[in-house]
Image (spheres, rainbow, N blue to C red):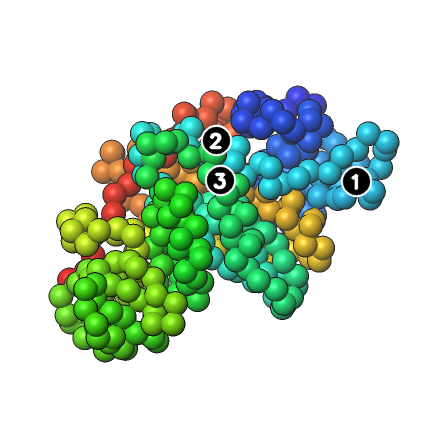
């Protein structure tokens, strides 16, 4: 049975963006991610059932093909099989995303850790965009396994460096539980800008001053936003800009350390507020979207490869949704739907009406104005 136009389009895109994969790997990757997109579910049983009914394929053979995509070489059938080293495709994935970006002069990445019950800890770097977050680099670790995360973060950051155009300004957002002076300096050495939230513990010192002050007392509720050139943390000082804000409607202050100059922060703002989009990205990945939390994969290496399929599905949905959102806004039609939902509706409608998908793209974004 011939493939639908949307699937042929997706296979062609994958072949262009990821030519390093073999023909068989690209076809299985396209089938798997296409099935996730159309069913809005990453469960293998649902994806296999949908593809088997749609394409007239034998379910048992199809299930084995999809399953083996995540396997190690020794677990695959055949003599010429090879495993996919997902980390070598992080840079091509980001390059692919940026190729659909209109004038990619600014890129905002968010680093975070998410957990799948007590089985896995996933360290991930995501591109945040209009209420969504697309994974572009990740490492799956065993849940509650002891060990340092710093080397992992460095490897993930390095894997993306070659994909960013020279004129593109990159901001990397870190939650307060992930603060590290070494990571701050690593990001700066790459020519990127770290924006890290820190706790109100420790001390800071204004530049050219001798006195150290407690971070717990630097902010007051309802204060005017401040950007101070300081050294943070008396035990291991970090020369940085300390951004302090505490809007009256919030219960606690927000303290950020960054390499950005105070004048720029006051004039242009900062991107940290966009980090909330990563929470919406978790919703798209889990219960509100692809239902990743229902996965039963227990081996970290297999989960590492499987997440590559999920990332491609999210990328396609968000890209199609971005175009659809712009069209609705141009027509004066308000929409509260997420980009992933709009993207799914757009692909579904094109399939039902048998018309080609529209050219999809990402629009530039600007920093939100900090609350005063």
Label number found at residue 96: 2
Q: Earlier in the sequence, mark 3 or mark 1?
A: 1
Query: Which mark's residue is nearer the viewer, 3 or 1?
Result: 3
Q: Quadrant of the C terminus?
A: bottom left
Q: Report whether 38 appears left or right of 355.
A: right
Residue at numbered disc 3: 160
Label number found at residue 73: 1
Q: Is residue 233 above or below residue 334?
A: below
Rendering coords of residue 62 (x, y %): 75, 37
Q: Nearer the viewer, residue 280 or 179?
A: 179
Q: Residue at x 40, y 45 (%)?
A: 189
Q: Report whether 115 appears left or right of 223.
A: right
User: Does residue 90 appear in the picture of this structure?
Assistant: yes
Q: Residue at x 31, y 66 (%)?
A: 232
Q: Is residue 359 above or below residue 289?
A: above
User: Does residue 294 appear in the picture of this structure?
Assistant: no
Rendering coords of residue 158 (x, y %): 50, 43
Contact flag, marks 3 and 1 (Cβ < 8 Å): no
Q: Residue at x 83, y 42 (%)?
A: 74
Disc 3 secondary structure class: helix
């Amino acid at each position: 049975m011939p493939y639908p136009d949307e699937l042929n389009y997706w296979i062609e895109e994958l072949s262009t963006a990821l030519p390093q994969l073999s023909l068989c790997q690209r076809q299985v990757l396209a089938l798997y991610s296409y099935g996730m997109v159309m069913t809005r579910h990453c469960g293998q049983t649902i994806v296999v059932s949908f593809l088997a009914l749609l394409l007239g394929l034998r379910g048992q053979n199809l299930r084995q093909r999809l399953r083996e995509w995540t396997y190690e070489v020794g677990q695959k059938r055949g003599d010429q099989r090879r495993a996919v080293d997902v980390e070598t495709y992080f840079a091509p994935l980001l390059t692919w995303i940026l190729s659909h970006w209109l004038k990619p002069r600014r890129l905002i990445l968010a680093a975070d850790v998410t957990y799948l019950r007590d089985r896995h800890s996933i360290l991930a770097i995501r591109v945040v965009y209009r209420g969504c977050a697309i994974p572009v680099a990740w490492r799956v670790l065993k849940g509650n396994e002891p060990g340092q995360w710093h080397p992992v973060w460095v490897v993930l950051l390095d894997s993306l460096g070659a994909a960013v155009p020279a004129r593109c300004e990159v901001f990397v957002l870190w939650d307060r539980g992930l603060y590290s002076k070494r990571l701050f300096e690593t990001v700066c050495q790459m020519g990127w800008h770290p924006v890290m939230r820190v706790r109100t513990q420790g001390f800071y010192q204004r530049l050219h001053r001798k006195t150290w002050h407690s971070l717990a007392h630097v902010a007051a509720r309802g204060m005017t936003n401040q950007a101070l050139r300081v050294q943070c943390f008396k035990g291991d000082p970090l020369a940085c800009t300390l951004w302090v804000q505490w809007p009256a409607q919030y219960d606690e202050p927000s303290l950020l350390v960054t390499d950005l100059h105070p004048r720029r922060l006051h004039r242009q703002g900062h991107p940290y507020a966009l980090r909330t989009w990563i929470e919406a990205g978790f919703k798209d990945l889990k219960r509100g979207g692809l239902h990743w939390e229902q996965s039963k994969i227990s081996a970290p290496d297999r989960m590492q490869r499987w997440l590559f399929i999920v990332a491609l599905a999210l990328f396609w949905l968000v890209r199609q949704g971005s175009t659809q959102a712009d069209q609705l806004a141009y027509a004066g039609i308000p929409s509260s739907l997420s980009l992933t939902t709009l993207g799914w509706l757009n692909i579904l409608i094109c399939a039902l009406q048998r018309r080609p998908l529209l050219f999809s793209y990402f629009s530039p974004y600007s920093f939100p104005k900090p609350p005063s």
